Amino acid sequence: MFQMKRKKLESILGDVDVFQNPKLRLEQYPTCPEIAASMLFTIESTYGDITGKCIADLGCGCGVLSIGSALMKCGYCVGFDIDEDALQTCLQNLDDMKITNVDLVQCDVPQLLTDARWSKRFDVVIMNPPFGTNNEGVDMLFLKTGLSLATDAVYSLHKTSTREHIEKKAEDWGVTMKVVAKLVYDLPLCYKNHKKKSVDIEVDFIRFSFKRQSRKSLLPQDGDLTDQSY
């Protein structure tokens, strides 16, 4: 198991460039270094789910979780995002840090659900998905997509206020859900409609794992998803 001090990881991630012009429709917010480092350190130190693992980062944005996974010695990581601008920033971050075991794919993340090529191709999925504030249900689409790609576990951030709903979904999908930690997401002023300099949002850091009989693909049946755009 690889060990990097959490504070050292947080310090390095503090140098990652973030969104210059975040897009409201995509709910783009940077994953702050403190939260990213805490997530990744816990994933590795508690579960051993980074070192040597094949990882997908859904909605990777500018790449803080992908870069952190590489620094924690993952075997390989693929970051998926729909936004070309964010991916360009991510690519520059990877180049600046001389990270070579992270690849990027531009796509609408929920569309991966219908592409059997990606089904169960990763050991672990990590993500800080859109919370569904501006596009209701997109958080669950990201989660279901993550579960379809992973063989071992999915780690994700979700608003604490949605925990009961997520618990029901996890039960429906036959997966085990564990709230690893309760965090406070300090959401900075990003958009013109924001009135405060920052807002604290309570979020759950959740681990989803598969029951023995539930490692099958979660590819949707006909009519299961009516709208995958966001």
Image (cartoon, helix red, strand yellow):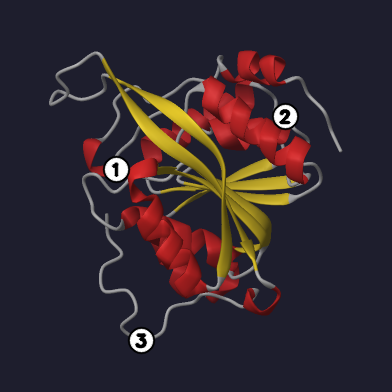
Q: Earlier in the sequence, mark 1 or mark 2?
A: 1
Residue 222 marker:
3
Q: Percent x, y for residue 100?
A: 71, 36
Q: Secondary structure at mark 3?
A: loop
Quadrant in which the C terminus appears: bottom left
Q: Position of residue 186 (x, y in %)?
A: 38, 22
Going by the numbered disc 2, the residue's amino acid type is Leu
The residue identified by callout 2 is 71
The residue positioned farthest toward the right in the image shown? 1
- Count of marks overlaid on the render: 3
Q: Which label number is shown at residue 131?
A: none
Q: Residue at x 74, y 47 (%)?
A: 49
Question: Mark 2 and mark 3 in contact (Cβ < 8 Å)?
Answer: no
Nearest to the observer: residue 196 or residue 190: 196
- Which is nearer the N-term, disc 3 or disc 1? 1
Q: Name the residue carrying label 1.
A: 26
Residue drawn 78% across the image and 44% down it: 48
Quarter of the N terminus within the rendering? top right
> As shown in the figure, which amino acid type bears the numbered disc 3?
Asp
Q: Whole-percent x and y of residue 72?
A: 75, 32
Q: Is residue 5 above or below residue 22?
A: above
Dot 1, crowdedness within 10 Å: few (<14), some or many (≥20)? some
Instruction: Measure the C-alpha gap from mark 1 to mark 2.
Output: 27 Å
Horizontal and vertical percent for residue 5? 76, 19
Q: Which residue is found at the position 43% from the left and 27% from the top?
A: 184
Measured along the vertical axis of the image, is residue 215 above or below residue 121? Answer: below
Label 2: state its secondary structure.
helix
Q: Residue 26 lies in what quarter of the image?
A: top left
